[in-house]
Every structure is written in C-alpha cells, then in structure tokens.
Image (spheres, helix red, strand yellow):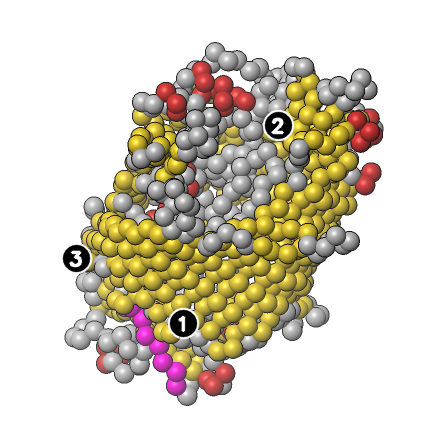
Amino acid sequence: MKFTLLLLAFGIVAISQAQTDSTKRYTTAWVKGTPPVIDGLLNDEAWEQVEWAGGDFRQVNPDKGKPASVQTKFKILYDDKNLYVIFRCYDPEPEKIVKRMSRRDSFDGDWVEIHIDSYYDKRTAFSFTSSVSGVKSDEYVSNNGDDWDASWDPIWYMKTSIDKEGWIAEMRIPLSQLRFTNKEELVWGLNVQRRFFRNQENSRWQYIAPDAAGYVHLMGEMNGIKGIKPQKQLEIQPYVVTKAETFQKEEGNPYATGKATTADFGLDAKIGITSDITLDLTVNPDFGQVEADPSQVNLTAFELYFREQRPFFTEGANTLNFPVAQNENNLFYSRRVGRQPQGWVDTDRSGDDGVNEYVKPVNRTKILGAAKLSGKNKKGFSWALMESVTAREYAEIDSLGHKRKEEVEPLTNYFVMRAQQDFNGANTVVGGMFTATNRQLDNPNLNWLHKSAYTGGLDFLHHWKERMYYISAKGMLSRVNGSTEAISATQLSSERFFQRPDNRHTKYDANRKSLTGTGGQLVIGKKSGNLVTDLGVTWQSPELELNDVGFLPQTDIISQWFWMQYRILKPRKITRSQRFNINEWREYDFGGRNLNEGYNVNAHAEFKNFWQAGGGVTYRVRSASNNDLRGGPTLRYPSMFYYWGYVNTDHRKKFYAMLTPEFGFGQKHYSRSMFMELRLTWRPTNALNLSLAPSYSRNQNEMQYVATADASGEPKYIVGRIDQNTVRMVIRATYMLTPNLSVQYYGQPFGTAGMYSSFKSITNPYASEYAGRFITLANMLTTVNNMYAIDENGDNATDYSFGKPDFNFGQFRSNMVMRWEYIPGSTFFLVWTRERNGAFYDSHPDHKSYSFDFNQKGHNIFLMKFTYRFRA
C-alpha cells in the first residue's frame, strides 16, 4: 500500500513547468588588424568590428524571468590563436560595486562569466569567470550542467576596470584551452551570466530558468566562426621542492633525531596528442601544499571517507566518475593511489632480550608516475583513462645499529577507464567503466592483499519530453583474486562479515581464491518544473568488492528510496525562494531482513533580507545492523527521531554567521545525541577573510559496541553505554595581497573523550522487546589492571574479560600556505604544516569540564615548492 501511494505521488503533474527563451544567436568576427590589448579598458579599435550583444539579460534569481536589475553587454572576437571577450557591466552606483578578493575559483563579489560549448555537443562546456577585483574562476561543465568542475585550471588572461558607468572585464582565451572539431565553419553554444552581488542576483543573456531540465543544451549560439584550426596543447611543468622537519626527539631512536631535511623534483605535463585527445601526466608528484584532513575518531565498523585534495586527481575527476548509490560509493576513489602503506612491521621494543628495535616511518606510498588520457569526438563519444604505478615501499628497522628492510607495500599498477556515447541529441547516454588493480606480491607477509582486482560498470540515461523526465540504470561487476588468506580476509572484513552466526544467505569459505560480486541501480525521475522527484532502488551483493581502487564501506544491501521536492524559485511574500522535501527509504539485506526504514520532511527558505533558514525531522522507524557486532549476529535498535535546523545571516555583509543545531532521541532511552555548530565569517577588508567555526557534540548510546570476548570458545558480544564529548574549532584566514598572491591559514584543534559504563552482553540481538536483547553485567564485573573480568555464572571464577575502552584524544592540525602565481600557470609555494597530539580530558572531578593537553612536541614541516610551466 505504501509503495502504491509513492507511485501515485510520483505521477503528480507539476503546477508549472520551467520556461526558457527561444534560442538567441550572436555573430562574432575575425579580428582585422591589431587584436585588443587585454587591459580592462574599452579603448581598442578592434572592438568596433562587432556590435554589442545583450542589454536584455533576465534574472535567474531571485525573481526568475524578470529583467535584470542592472544590464550587461558583451562583444566577442577571434583570430587563429585566441578568443577575445569584453563585458560592459552597467551599475548606476559604481561606488557600491563589491570588490572582494579571494583565491581562484571562489566566486566572491561581483563577477561576470562566459560559457562556451565549443564541441557543440549540448552536454559539456567551458566556463571562464572574471570578478571585478581581477580574480579568475574557471570550470569544466559536464552532464548538461549537472557537474561544474572548478579544479580545471586553464591558462587565460583577464583584466578589469571600474568607471562611472559600472565596470569592464576583458579576456583573452587561447584556443588551445578549448576543444572543437576541425571544420571550416563552426557553431558553438554560448551563454553569459552576471552576478550582481549586493542584490544577490544572477542574470543571463540566454535565459534558462533555474528549474529547467538541464543547462548546456538550452544555451544560445555563437555563429561566424570560420577558418580556425584546433590547437595542440603542450604544457610541461617541472617542480623542485625542499622540505625541513622538526619533531619530538627520542633518545636512542636513529629515526627520531628531532629534525630532517629532504629535496625532490618531479614533472607535470599536459599534451594535446590530437585536437580531440589530451594527455595529463605526472612523474614523482608532490602534494605538500595540500590541506590536512580533518581529525576524526571512528567508532563504527566502516571506513571513513575523506575527500580528494591532490590537484592531479581533482582536475577532471568527473571524467572518471561512476557513483554507486546515493553516497560516496564509487568505482574509483583516487585516494587509494598513493595511500599509506597497508603492511606493518612487528618489532621488539624492550623485548625479552632487552633490545630495542626502531622503525623508520613510511607515511605514504610513492607515486612513481601517473597519466590521464582523455578525448571526445564530434560524434558524441567521450572517454578517459588513467594509468598509475606506485612504488614498492619498505620499512627500515634498526636493531643495535644493524639495519634491515621489510616490505610494507607491493609494487602496484592502477588502471581506470571511462567511456560514454550520447545519442538522439544527447537525450540518451550510454556508458561504461572498467578498473584494474594488479600487485606484484613477492613478499609472503603481504599475501593477505589481493593479487588482482577488477571492476566493471555499465550505465544508461534517457530523457524525454524536453528532458523533463528521465530514467537511469547502472550495473556493476567485481572480481578479486588472491591467496586463500587474502580472500578469507575479504569475506571476514567489516564490509561483509560472512562469518555472522545468523547469516543464512552467504557462506564463509576458507578455501576460496576469488570472489565475484554484482551491484546495480535503477532510478526514474522528473527534473524540471516546480515539482521534482525521483524513485529508485540500488543493490550491492554481499560479494561485491570495490575497495582496491574504489570506495564501498558496506555490501549486502538492497535499498529503495523516494524523494520529492516542491520549490518556489521566485519572491513570494517575505521570501526570495522556498523548497519543501519529503523522503522515504528502506533497506534490506540479501536474506530479506528489513534493516532500515525511515521518513523525513524538511523545508528551506531564503528571505528578502537575505537570511536563510531551514530544518527537518527524520523518523527512523526501524534500524538494525549486520556489522555493528563486528562479525556477530544482526543487532536491532529501537526507533529514533532526529531534528535539525540552520539559520544563516546575510552573507553579503562584512560579518555573517550560521548556526546549525541537531538533536537525536532514541526510543526506550537507548540513545541521545546533540550537535551544535556556529560559523562566523568576517571580512574587515576586501582582501582579508577570517572565519571561525566552533562545534560541540555529545553522543550517549546504551548500545555502543565494546568488544568480542572469548568465553571458553564461545564469543560474547559486549556493548555498553558511551558518553562521548567532542569539540572542534576550524579556523581559516585568507589574505589576498593581489589576485595572484595569497596567504592562507587553516587550523583545527580537535578533542574527543569517551567514557563507558553499563556494560551488557548481547543474548538475543533481534528480540522484539529491547530489554530482551541483552543481559546487564553490572553485578558480574570486577576491574583488574584496566581490564574488566566477568563472572557470569557466579562461581567466583572469571568467565571472560575485556579491556577498558575509555579514550581521550586531542590533536591540533594547522597549515599555512603562501601561493604566488608569478606568471599564468607557474607557481611558487611556501608552506608550514604543524601537527601536535595529546589528550582531551575531564579536568574537574564534580562536573564535566574538558581541557586540551597537547603534551607532545609539535611535528613541523617547512616546505618550499617552485613550479614553472613551459608552453609551446
């Protein structure tokens, strides 16, 4: 009955549909004589060769479809090497133009941008943005406007100026940065968009409603392009880096002397093989300027996901993207390449013979080289592949001056390939992806790793009725090969736990040497108009394994979801826009057990004073986990309510704030949680941006997993009441000396402490009554040397024991980077990275009063990196 109602809801017709203008056309011309000088001034005779376009921009927001509050005009010229663009951005009050400066791709203050579909495939485009302060932003647009990749950093030139009529932006875009077909006469997709910051207004030359189904296929056209040839791109960027470190000195440890220095070099390159094919490669890359990951303490059975921040892997990441389900799951997770070595070394530290052994740390696997090859042709076929090789890594061990090496990471090859073909005017897209991981396992101690791993996926997307409706389907297959030890480890891993005693639909087989799994997804939806929605199902078989080069924290799931949003994207009464959502979802394992069922409603609004607010409530009707007991039976939890909200003040102001509270309440008093974050941002000048984001969370859970104890061969699954307090402060500061010279600081003090009590032993984990799922251990427990001993049968003998699980952890990570792009594409970095660890402890005996104690000497890294880009 519920599913039928969802289907009926899915079929509701929207009250109104998105509207767009008829296609606009702009005719450009070849520059005759001297081309424009890019100085941000409208004083070149060349610009008289073409007429102004624009003057009739319409708002995308806040008042969709209405004429823009301030108008914009533009002109475009070209020659055999460059595209030239000039914008006249009118403003009746030029003294109020917002000239905020920021790092590249930050889109702050007033700006104007051009979107160019030079392939004219109606799916992809290149975006070039100029802020009035002279800051560049650029994006590669794909999936018909669904993905805007700001990691794409082409070389182009831009200047701006302010006068009594408003402001001017002038651009020169080398044709080598664009991709187009080799034809005598070309038609390109074109649009121009402007941000009028103080009104928070976006307007476009070719009006495309914000609730339209797609973007690129609705852009205007640029005609008059004749006689240009695709340019072959050749850019080579060597680098040199020097690094000095200071850290805690350890007496007797030859690898902890308190200081270290290194120097290295490498190479990045971008080569146009043909006009349609580009090669990106890196040899011995260095990512020392990348911001540190946020501190985390993981109490779950699942791997944590951290976003990619390394430039080689972030640029063009959407071309090698194959998401699985509605989270971070993906066939390719680039952080697998160059990860921390997976092996370890058993050493004798103050052992029976009194000899100390010391290990030289290896923090990450060296990437010997990596290459990405990508291409697209005029028939709508696009493809990309990546090949990477990581080094064999050794840990060096010192024992009384005698050194030996043990392998901790094998030589590994990673291969990833993605291809897509569009049909029917890009209304239909068919694609596929393949990944391969191959390891050279010469060391028997690493036989628990897969020798090889392969995954493949096929996807299909079809739109109809002017792209208002769509259907999407995906299928996936994985196979891993290795020793019986490796495949046993895969079966017993936290992603699947085949050994669960109540697992009736999969079987642990210690003799297996391979594992093959499948997955898939089917979604049908409506993506334009006031009412948008989708209904989907996804599945990941118990044997599916993506984690050699992908990301998949959990398998054995069949998920169904429904989402619907009603949106009002124009001013109404006191609001500028409103959105209302409903969600429903269910999860089952492949044995048919209902693991999760929940419902959510939420609403969001932006007000006419530019404040924003939203909130929602989630009711989790049913919750059970096949993983929380770490190989034990499925554990069922009582139902739970979550409440959350947020309020943002007007971010046009020099000072603005955001408050985000969240609360959770479990039935039967089994759980309570609270999270509170306050974000404060202050811009005392256009060049300086300061932000502070303190947060506090408290988690109280009666069913937190503690340990699996051994009672004469019988496993005892122990849970307890955890009272965990966590604080975090994210500090950021950016100072722009010029648009190309910046100093950035990132700091994060983090502390978390957990105290356990009310220990329980799980006896009937899926009992209908919560109290029938466990027995309490309070009267059976004694403490001996940080261990808990349990006498369950009352015979004054210990039946089993487990360690005291309390923890406290404090960490302060910080990163300061000076970045100077002294010529386009060439950069000089000065970097200081610091990490200091310690404790976060309860400092008051009568009430909770937590304090940091960073009792370890900080680990400091000082880095200088110089890059120079050669262009041909």
623 relative position to 732: left or right = right
Q: Residue 776 carries which label?
A: none
* Residue plotted at (57% across, 35% down): 302
Q: In which quarter of the image is the N terminus?
A: top right
User: Of helix, strand and loop, which one carries label 1?
Assistant: strand
Query: Disc 1 and disc 2: Cα gap in Å?
Result: 50 Å
Instruction: Choose between 615 and 575: the one closer to the eye.
Output: 615
User: Of helix, strand and loop, which one carries label 3?
Assistant: loop
Q: Position of residue 118 (x, y in %)?
A: 32, 55
Q: Position of residue 14 (x, y in %)?
A: 65, 51
Quick one: label 2 or label 3, which is nearer the N terminus?
2
Q: Which mark is residue 736?
A: 1
Quick one: label 1 or label 2, which is nearer the N terminus?
2
Q: Position of residue 746 (x, y in %)?
A: 48, 61
Q: Which amino acid does label 2 sit on?
A: Arg
Above or below, 309 relative to 129 = above
* Residue plotted at (48% across, 78% down): 685
Q: Name the residue under label 2.
A: 630
Give the magenta-colored segment's residue range. 154-163
Q: Position of residue 484 (x, y in %)?
A: 44, 15
Q: Of tags 1 and 2, which is closer to the observer?
A: 2
Quick one: label 1 or label 3, which is nearer the N terminus?
1
Query: Disc 2 and disc 3: Cα gap in Å?
Result: 57 Å
Residue 181 visible, this angle: no
Q: In which quarter of the image is residue 534?
A: top right
Q: Is residue 368 within the magenta segment?
A: no
Residue 687 visible, this angle: yes
Query: Disc 1 and disc 3: Cα gap in Å?
Result: 31 Å
Q: Which amino acid does label 1 sit on?
A: Met
Q: What residue type is labelled 3?
A: Ala
Most common secondary structure along the magenta stretch = strand
